Image: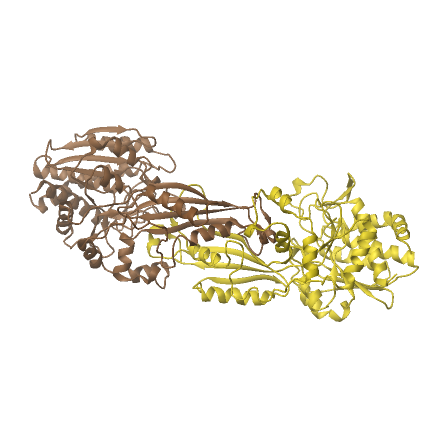
Chain colours: A yellow, B brown
Amino acid sequence: MTTQDLRNALARLAPKHLEEFRRLVEIPSISAQGTGIDEAAKAVAELCEARGFRTEIRPTAGNPVVCAWGGADDGPTLLFYEHYDVQPPEPVDEWTHPPFEITEHDGKYFGRGTADTKGHIMLRLAAIDAAREVFGGDPIRYVFLVEGEEEIGSPNLEGFIEDNAADLKADACLWEFGGVEEDGRPGVSLGLKGIQTFELRAQCPNRDAHSSLGAVIDNPLYRLAAAVASLRDEDGRILIEGFYDDVRELTKAELAAIEAEPPRDDAMKAEYGLDGFLGGASGFELTRRLQAEPCLNVNGFHGGYGGAGTKTVLPSRGLVKLDFRLVPDQKPARVVEQLESHLQRNGFGDIEVIPMAGEGPGRTPLDDPFVKIVCDAAREAYGMEPLIRVSSAGTGPAAPFRDVLGVPFATAGCGYPGSRGHAPDENIRIADFENGKLHTALVIAGLRGT
Amino acid sequence: MTTQDLRNALARLAPKHLEEFRRLVEIPSISAQGTGIDEAAKAVAELCEARGFRTEIRPTAGNPVVCAWGGADDGPTLLFYEHYDVQPPEPVDEWTHPPFEITEHDGKYFGRGTADTKGHIMLRLAAIDAAREVFGGDPIRYVFLVEGEEEIGSPNLEGFIEDNAADLKADACLWEFGGVEEDGRPGVSLGLKGIQTFELRAQCPNRDAHSSLGAVIDNPLYRLAAAVASLRDEDGRILIEGFYDDVRELTKAELAAIEAEPPRDDAMKAEYGLDGFLGGASGFELTRRLQAEPCLNVNGFHGGYGGAGTKTVLPSRGLVKLDFRLVPDQKPARVVEQLESHLQRNGFGDIEVIPMAGEGPGRTPLDDPFVKIVCDAAREAYGMEPLIRVSSAGTGPAAPFRDVLGVPFATAGCGYPGSRGHAPDENIRIADFENGKLHTALVIAGLRGT
């Protein structure tokens, strides 16, 4: 088997794969709006069945999960974590191309889900087909886990993985997103942060009062402001007792990988109109914080008068929305306890704490053999040294893959910085799509040990 | 002259005064909406002219001020500060009676402005008429100052008083509001707090960003929360350096007057559903804070996501609206400087400070002879010991009366706790209206020294 064999096979099969891709994108499987869910699950299942995979659409409390098993009877097993749901197309007016079909234009495929993440489902299926041709049969075992709620926070995925762990065992996992960096280098991401979101609520008078009464009646917006201010310092360091206890130290190899990343300082400053970063971070430290530092965000703060001019009101109520981004080995449930007890201990027992969504962090060790396979495959497919990212700054359902299945995961994909995921004119570059198929096929070959 | 003479004269003139009152209330002179302004100014001027007063409608940068001079050629001068503008009637659906006419029902006069403050214009005119009859001529000199912007914060009054001070000289002033307490006792208020309002604005990224970037980009809602938290402690004490420097100490007599007030603790707790008050204040201390303690209010705090569930956004901008209530001898302009330098000194130089409205505080000393005149008149008119209030908890344009005209002021009026000022079904009780006329007439008599 040579890389060129795989490339040839993929080129020959490309029209068929594009047809399959078109059918997937044409289904508006919008989890936030509840449309096209069953149709998309069925379509994915059919694509797996067409390859001779044993396929099941398993129910959850929310949208069903498509599971499929196929490939070799023994040997290494590669798990593909994907999702068939997409973001809503709104604002529809801002699309240059129709959201729910694939438009080929300017070397790109436009359409909702091309990057996130129906394109990635196609990379896996195309790679399987090419490997089957070139190897004269499936070189390894495959498991598909294709959920339908990723775009609404995967609320049922952890439970599903726990309940179905025996059926999802694998030696390695390719993650649902991935792609190339700004400069065209393939990126390989090995982790995701966790998250715990909260709503904080305060009430002082039981109805809005005249602000002259502020001399004697406390103010819910002050209460919330003081509570929020107590949670972190001006450099972004979180002041909750024990918050950093579970933060796993980065290994020397991870620190070196972070150090090796091209600095993003100037690009981020330009993109967001900034003079500098929290705590004066720059270079290595900027990258380290993005990938490996937990943080607190205030997503929203609302109460009282917000219009023009002055209204001397003492508002009855206020509302704050927070998220904490977590890193291994922090646990969302422990952060809930820590925030509650911090507020109690610091005189904010009057503030109602409502935990919202929680997702644990996960990170594949840099020295896991699968990381080498994915990086070698990337180097071969793209002809460039891959950029290893210890972790994404973002969040995904990584915890059950690490903690329940114990599987290493990495990314190999077709996104790029201009993909406009979640936005109008979502797109992938056709060259990245083809390279992503090859990258995936080379991961399959690598896992087989050829 | 006996009180009964005044009472008889007022009773005889009551139908005429009710007709005049009706005409005033029928003009929807809503300063916030710019309706009926000239008509109301003209109507007030005509009522003064009809009594032989020299009357002028003087322009300002906003709504005109009606000034009138009349009464005796010499002797003491009593200034009536009033306003011809009213609050909007909205929500109109919630009125049981038409807002812009007087409806007599259940011993009350309903209609917008009956309490605030066209009823008070009528008390003064009725008292002048009765005193003229009983004394066989005007016993003292009168000046009317009737503005048209009280309900929008009197933005032009201070300047008007400064520019027209020579024409507004007086020995004493009756304020535009006043009335009886919950238990029917006449109240005499001697002061008003000042105010300085602000808008604080923060911006971090120049557009909303994904909250995963909160690891390195600061958050405008945290910046504002920390700034607000730095301004006061949990007991309501303001932490701005020098903020209390100009607070005039209460005299023994003022402390005694505050001590003599019936405690409002239980009533306020019930009205606003509270367990207690800021800093554990109760009884005397509760009243003292309401009347004589400056305070900080957060009127509004807005930024980022406020809807249901979670949105992991790092908002670009946030907005806070604040008011400081001030007491003698604090100055709004000094509070502007103090807030700006507090934020600079405490690391919040990134926060934009926008001073909005400012109004100075004012308080008539308890030992001013006019206070005794107003209290004696109240005792005589109502047959009950008046309740002296060192200051209202609220704000009004007191500063130019104290600082420019140097005139003592006090209240004598027809409002009551059920008056629903600014709300649907604004009303006064007819008995309070009649007693308020008599109280005003007795103040006139008292000022003459009879």
**Residue A45 location, quadrant:** bottom right
Q: Position of residue B409 (x, y in %)?
A: 20, 43
Q: Is residue A160 visible?
A: no
Against B309, residue B129 (above or below) is: above
Give the percent coordinates (x, y) of residue A368. Answer: 75, 64
A353 left or right of B19 in image: right
Q: Quadrant of the C terminus of chain B?
A: top left
Looking at the image, residue B164 sits to the left or right of residue A264; the answer is left
Give x and y (percent) for residue B334. 33, 43
* Residue B231 location (% of width, % of height): 40, 52
Residue at (30%, 31%) from the top-left corner?
B64
Task: Tell which residue pokes out farthest to the right in this image.
Answer: A136
Q: Is residue A238 left or right of residue A304?
A: right
Q: Considering depth in this image, is B300 or B110 the residue closer to the camera?
A: B300
Q: Residue at x 59, y 65 (%)?
A: A332
The correct choice, above or below, for B420 with respect to B274 in the image is: above
- Quadrant containing the N terminus of chain B is top left
Q: Quadrant of residue B257?
A: bottom left
Vertical relation: B438 (above or below) A224: above
Picture residue at 29% right of the left edge, 39% below the top: B25
Q: Is residue A434 visible?
A: yes
